[in-house]
């Protein structure tokens, strides 16, 4: 990429001389008086100006061109040739979200699931160079969106996510194993699984700790997030008349298990989110830890470009002098 700049830009203020010279020339031309005076001008009726007279302003134009070009040359114009190469090392990330019935608890507003979806969507929108996927689990697990760079599809499917499509329960091991299958064969330099849950493993055929060990074998980093307030949380129930009633239920999160699962993988970490703000901070922290690596190589070369302006100034000045000594020579 090429750009033009001036090494001494303050010299360009001298260009203000040019319009002042134009004003001076016009004023001088209008104030000129004839060297010979006649009592009447009838003798000159029908006499037209010669080409030499019509082109007389060219002398001033050449002088202004010479001055302008000389000032531009003194400002030392330079061209800069630059080349920038950017290499982005992408990260493959699989969001693994718990969609069991307890995610309807309203210690997060409007509830745990909707709060998690909103925070996850903001996280996805900020990872423009990464492939991302979505796995959901309850009593069983499946892939909602495979790894993709098209985040619009991912965000659309995340927004449609709701409870009731899977057998209820919490199959941590199955959810993690499904996520591992989505990312294990990836050639990305960094592979990450973010597992979000609000419960205790009580379903599934895969032991959660064993799944974490498998993640370690494939160099997958695991972040686990426990979602839920401390103590009890309001949970909506439908009564016999279809009305919504709330009952406080115990918040049960197997933190030792989630912490152990994360610690099994290199660089893995466990987080606890007791409200939406805490969940947002957790995703921001993960975002900061998993920044894509960008290698930038920039080449630049500066070259002086004053010579063309200097040549123009010399040619214009030379032409003016030549014309004044020949065609426009005046008798002393």
Image (cartoon, helix red, strand yellow):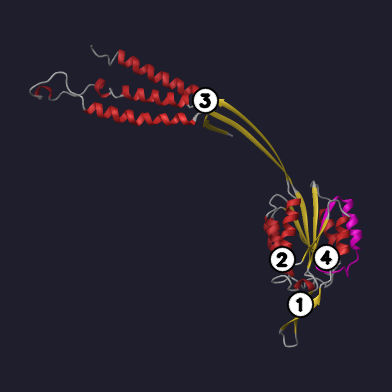
Q: Residues within 10 Å of mark 4 (few under 14, many from 20)?
A: many
* Distance CA(mark 2)–CA(mark 1): 16 Å
Which one is closest to the eye, mark 3 or mark 1? Answer: 1
Q: Give yes or no for contact between labels 3 and 1 (Cβ–Cβ under 8 Å).
A: no
Residue bearing mark 1: 235
Regarding residue 147, the answer to whether it shows in the image is no
* Distance CA(mark 4)–CA(mark 3): 67 Å
Asked whether 216 or 205 is in front, the reply is 216
Q: Residues within 10 Å of mark 3 (few under 14, many from 20)?
A: some
Q: Earlier in the sequence, mark 3 or mark 1?
A: 1
Residue bearing mark 4: 141
114 relative position to 82: left or right? right
Res. 134 image quadrant: bottom right
Residue drawn at x 92%, y 59% as measured from the top left = 210
Q: Earlier in the sequence, mark 4 or mark 2?
A: 4
For residue 48, above or below residue 122: above
Secondary structure beneath disc 1? strand
* Residue 169 percent across, percent down from the top left: 84, 72
197 relative position to 120: left or right? right
* Distance CA(mark 4)–CA(mark 1): 24 Å
Range of residues picked out in magenta: 198-223
Which one is closest to the eye, mark 4 or mark 1? Answer: 1
Which one is closest to the eye, mark 2 or mark 1? Answer: 2
* Distance CA(mark 4)–CA(mark 2): 25 Å
- Which disc is residue 2 wearing? none
Q: Earlier in the sequence, mark 4 or mark 3?
A: 4
- Which disc is residue 305 wearing? 3
Res. 147 image quadrant: bottom right
* Residue 48 percent across, percent down from the top left: 18, 24
């Amino acid at each position: 990429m090429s750009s033009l700049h001036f090494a001494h830009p303050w010299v360009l203020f001298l260009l203000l001389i040019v319009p002042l010279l134009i004003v001076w020339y016009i004023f001088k031309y209008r104030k000129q008086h004839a060297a010979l005076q006649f009592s009447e001008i009838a003798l000159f009726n029908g006499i037209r100006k010669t080409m030499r007279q019509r082109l007389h302003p060219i002398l001033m134009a050449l002088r202004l061109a010479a001055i302008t070009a000389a000032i531009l040359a003194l400002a030392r114009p330079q061209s800069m040739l630059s080349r920038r190469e950017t290499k982005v090392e992408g990260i493959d990330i699989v969001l693994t979200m718990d969609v069991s019935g307890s995610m309807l608890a309203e210690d997060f507003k409007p509830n745990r699931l909707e709060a998690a979806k909103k925070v996850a969507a903001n996280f996805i929108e900020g990872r423009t160079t990464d492939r991302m996927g979505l796995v959901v689990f309850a009593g069983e697990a499946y892939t909602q969106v495979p790894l993709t760079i098209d985040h619009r599809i991912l965000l659309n499917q995340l927004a449609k996510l709701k409870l009731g499509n899977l057998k209820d329960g919490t199959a941590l091991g199955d959810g993690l194993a499904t996520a591992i299958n989505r990312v294990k064969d990836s050639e990305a330099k960094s592979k990450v699984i973010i597992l979000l849950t609000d419960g205790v493993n009580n379903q599934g055929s895969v032991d959660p700790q064993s799944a974490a060990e498998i993640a370690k074998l494939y160099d997958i980093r695991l972040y686990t997030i426990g979602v839920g307030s401390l103590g009890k949380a309001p949970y909506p129930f439908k009564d016999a008349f279809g009305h919504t009633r709330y009952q406080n239920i115990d918040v049960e999160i197997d933190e030792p298990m989630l912490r152990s699962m994360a610690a099994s993988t290199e660089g893995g970490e466990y987080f606890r989110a007791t409200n939406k703000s805490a969940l947002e901070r957790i995703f921001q922290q993960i975002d900061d830890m998993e920044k894509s690596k960008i290698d930038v190589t920039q080449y630049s070369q500066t070259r002086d470009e004053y010579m063309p302006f200097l040549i123009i100034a010399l040619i214009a000045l030379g032409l003016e002098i030549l014309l004044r000594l020949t065609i426009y020579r005046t008798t002393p």
